[in-house]
Amino acid sequence: MSANTFGQIFKVTTFGESHGPAYGLIIDGCPAGIEVNLDLLKANLKRRRPGQSSITTARQETDEPEILSGVYQGKTLGTPICVVVRNQDQKSSDYDVVLAHPRVGHADDTWKMKFGHTDHRGGGRSSGRETLCRVIAGSFAQMLCQKIEPKIQIKSYSSQIGEFVLAYEETKDIWNTNIDQFTTRFPSERDPGIVKFLELAKLEGESYGGVVETQVRGVPAGLGQPVFHKFKSDLGAAMLSLGAVTGFEFGDGFGGVTLKGTEFHHTMNSESYGGIRGGITTGDPLLFRVGFKPTSSIKDISKKGRHDPCIVPRAVPVVEAMAWLTIADHLLWVRLDKA
Amino acid sequence: MSANTFGQIFKVTTFGESHGPAYGLIIDGCPAGIEVNLDLLKANLKRRRPGQSSITTARQETDEPEILSGVYQGKTLGTPICVVVRNQDQKSSDYDVVLAHPRVGHADDTWKMKFGHTDHRGGGRSSGRETLCRVIAGSFAQMLCQKIEPKIQIKSYSSQIGEFVLAYEETKDIWNTNIDQFTTRFPSERDPGIVKFLELAKLEGESYGGVVETQVRGVPAGLGQPVFHKFKSDLGAAMLSLGAVTGFEFGDGFGGVTLKGTEFHHTMNSESYGGIRGGITTGDPLLFRVGFKPTSSIKDISKKGRHDPCIVPRAVPVVEAMAWLTIADHLLWVRLDKA
Amino acid sequence: MSANTFGQIFKVTTFGESHGPAYGLIIDGCPAGIEVNLDLLKANLKRRRPGQSSITTARQETDEPEILSGVYQGKTLGTPICVVVRNQDQKSSDYDVVLAHPRVGHADDTWKMKFGHTDHRGGGRSSGRETLCRVIAGSFAQMLCQKIEPKIQIKSYSSQIGEFVLAYEETKDIWNTNIDQFTTRFPSERDPGIVKFLELAKLEGESYGGVVETQVRGVPAGLGQPVFHKFKSDLGAAMLSLGAVTGFEFGDGFGGVTLKGTEFHHTMNSESYGGIRGGITTGDPLLFRVGFKPTSSIKDISKKGRHDPCIVPRAVPVVEAMAWLTIADHLLWVRLDKA
Amino acid sequence: MSANTFGQIFKVTTFGESHGPAYGLIIDGCPAGIEVNLDLLKANLKRRRPGQSSITTARQETDEPEILSGVYQGKTLGTPICVVVRNQDQKSSDYDVVLAHPRVGHADDTWKMKFGHTDHRGGGRSSGRETLCRVIAGSFAQMLCQKIEPKIQIKSYSSQIGEFVLAYEETKDIWNTNIDQFTTRFPSERDPGIVKFLELAKLEGESYGGVVETQVRGVPAGLGQPVFHKFKSDLGAAMLSLGAVTGFEFGDGFGGVTLKGTEFHHTMNSESYGGIRGGITTGDPLLFRVGFKPTSSIKDISKKGRHDPCIVPRAVPVVEAMAWLTIADHLLWVRLDKA
């Protein structure tokens, strides 16, 4: 069964365990003739990589992607694209303690029970390192989208870290903002303070949850396939497949349930809809939010600074990747709508 | 493409438009030998049917399911199960106004644009009436689950209607509560007051959103398939495929993002997890919430009481159906986990 | 699992047992805007119907298709198309003997063993009557193809019945020949003699196998998706899914294995290729053959003339239907080939 | 779209082009706990490798499989298994002539037209080298089968090479015969003569087709899923997905069409059925044949002995691999048959 495949047309299958030889992915369903932008690929991977600031895990990963198939003379061939990233030669000794003491909040025990095996090493496949495959696949999706609908732009950012909540006003100029200039990817002048707060949490073995908010513009109307592959359904599934994610909402989301209908539906292009009506994109900008629980690698076992005190800043490029994948899949799908 | 298919193993495909001859569904993937409980099927359909109280649309629907295939001598055959429900002889005249005036918040215009056609009648396939197929399919899923894991129980209820929010204490005795004794399915002594509130809204052409909360007990540990068919991902996609749904969260959800990690992860069986860790069920009770926006059939076009002032009470059995479908699919899937 | 679904994009799911209330099918994946030609549908069904000549089973079937969904004002909506055909009120008493005596060559016992049930009635789902669903679905596929590539034409005919083998010369003028003017669909002046031969076989409870040969012209180059959905692979699977089929070959097929390479490959457009090279259609006419074993409803249990002494003549429109389905699926698929 | 995926449950996706960096495959759907037999894997690869006798292409390939994921401590993890094989540093100059002169019988031009690109190198993905991925995947399928049903054995052999046809008597003792002791894998004392015949053909730039026949014993009854994943349908699709294959038949196949029904169906366990009735395995031994056209790399461009004068001997292990894959898929699928 395709448990490790995302998408119906632009199909991505990821593989790899955290301490095996490599991670990687296949894309089956990428059309021929897409220009492969290696700079984009590497830039996206760099944004995901840990160890680049004081508020991420100290764990070092060198993520060198190698394209094994599907690309020739800088363009996609229409055949499966396989990309692998070698894991560094890491000792699994750090993780041996896990054998005896399954880590709170981790998937160590649920996976062991499920498959009946003993891959205790770093959570095996449930490691956050698997997300680098998504970033690579998402980069190819982005290249596809930018060929078909060059106007599409995606902007994700931390909108909540613990109790710090981004104000609506702070998002007004978001399209002109370089999110990465903020260490926490929380686009606010409160960023330095939150950094200090998270540095302290890291020292204390504490952690916090948060929210990644995303805006998308340039998405054409008509994406989404009723009734079980509505755009909201596929987008939600994409986000909920990420580790630590506990909630998804779009438009006014849970906040909108207290509005009166006459307030919510004031116009056909109401921002309340988040760019999706009847499960189908309207052509208006998309808006959605993804909730993350506090990082689970806390205190007792994280003796070496091996945890992000809040995963949200580093989740930003991963959320963007999953959004690109969802859009790419549906951009191709609409080619089948009409005779 | 399988836009209208839900599930990977217990596969349900629904069909039908609101004013065509019939709605229906096929289940391909139901094992042989399940006893078909027609009373259960009819009871579930009755719970979804409109026109049974002062706070639902006055529209009358007689939902007589006919099983066309897949069942013999009271048991499933292992072949595709098809069930159809005839639509009543309804005039489409009520809906003719829609032609000229696409309804705010409805899918009339997005669908028309997408497929290039003119099925203006009652929203066509985007009608809420499509959910009766889900309730039928969900009933078969329930029969399957109760054969394989008889202890599984699902309890959904309105936990928020507009600004009325159910208190945690009011859910304490939920397993001993008959939700349907409350007209609003909001299990609280505030129910009569909310009924009055919604009757007024109906008169005024106003509407409200809300939340359906669900608890599940008896679910075995190990359901969910990493990394793209985690239980949370499939459950979320199921709920987000429903009309009017704008958010999904489980466990502490968005509320949990403000907790410290040391609070959230106080134990392996923390209620904060909502019964899911690493994307896989832990064997603890499930808890999740589904957010609904205010009903869109408001004022201007609802001249005949043809709207639910809040869809949440009637969505309760539909949410349960989608939960049964997700569980049934994963109960079969785990048969493939080990050699 | 989708055991009853054919196709990757133009997806057809069939349902129904021979003595249940109805047969039917859903097409999920037919684009919007295809004109529905009911005359074509009925004509195709009529060609498959038994009881129309002295060499088919005497069993009477009235095949009245009812379209339940997916069509509005004469055009497809882009939503799932469901069509059902009611079974006549047939006594299952004729088949009660089967209970005690599983029929030689039938699937009665293999199905019973597999699913553990007792649907002995007429073979249940393994009945040849299931092919009417394929003819209906194939008719919609034909309508789609004729919209997208109007030049495509398919011509199937009996090329072998028992030891009667059609000569190459007899196929020279095949595109100007009305196959149905021959009772055996064996386009030769030997037809009346074969009819006599089969009438005798029917009397004696004897049966014969044969071959359906098919030519297709107007198929564009480029259909087929390497490496597991090559056109030949999908076409072969389509044919081998039919009851009684025991072999499939295209171009020179098994006959070509004795040729020298320099004879076989004398030109790029060699007829030897059967219109397929590298698994992909070349734009040249297709040629393929489907082998059928002798009908299994013979002597001992066929007390009432309830068997076709040779299934090949009546299989002709079913083979055509499966060819239309394969072509329709791939005509849509190539829309995804290039950026 | 999953053009490069085989199987419904034990899903194999292959990737790689003949002159790209590597070939490889992912298996998604292999249960946890299968012991990985590397010796078996290497032995199977060795059987497929060219350059081992005077009648195969002189092209040298070193096929060193590297397992990148899905295996830990000698057992499968239940996660995706990725295996890659690096291509040797080959000059594409040998193939530059192809640019100007598409090779007769090859897929060079059909692929180029289809995807609009210029991957002329060695046929790109249509190269026979892709079959090594199938042999690797088939080896894992074999390991799975031997765990679940240890009695299953598969024996393929050349039953026809050009006009040399294996006699029925020569297959009588097939289960005690080491096929590989015959250079042509044609288990007959005529083998040395055929070798000489093919050596001459190679010198002359001539080629021949042939047939691979396969017997399988120990297959349990009940494999195959009506109506579109009957065992015969999936097995046929598997074989027809191979390059150069132009026909598939099982049991008496095309030869059986001339039999009378009373001869063909003389008993429930008739060898005529080839072990499959109603599309489902009966528990009797399987028998099927796969027809190959003459190799297309002939005379004009094969200046360096770079062709197999008959592909049949080297296709033997590939046919076995596809048979293992089909059986593995269905061995898992039957777990879903009953409640």
Image (cartoon, coloured by chain):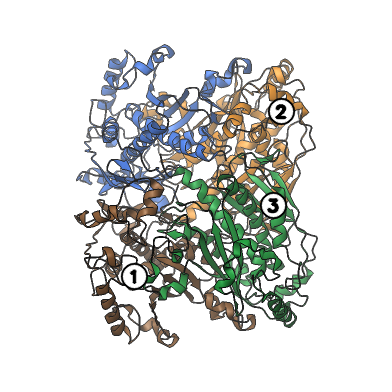
Chain colours: A green, B brown, C blue, D orange
State the image quarter where residue A177 is shown.
bottom right
Front-most of A41 and A103?
A41
The reply to the same-chain question for discs 3 and 2 is no
Q: Where is residue D147 drawn, in percent x and y? A: 61, 54
Which element type, helix, strand or loop, lies under badge 1? loop
State the image quarter where residue C41 is shown.
top left
Q: Which residue is labeled 2 in the image? A: D183
- In the displayed structure, D19 sits above or below A189; it is above
Q: Residues within 10 Å of mark 1 (few under 14, many from 20)?
A: many
- In the displayed structure, D228 sits above or below A180; it is above
Q: Which residue is labeled 1 in the image? A: B311
The kind of residue on which mark 2 rests is: Thr
Q: Which residue is labeled 3 in the image? A: A40
Residue at 67% across, 63% down? A178
Q: Where is residue A285 drawn, in percent x and y? A: 51, 59
Q: Chain of mark 2?
A: D
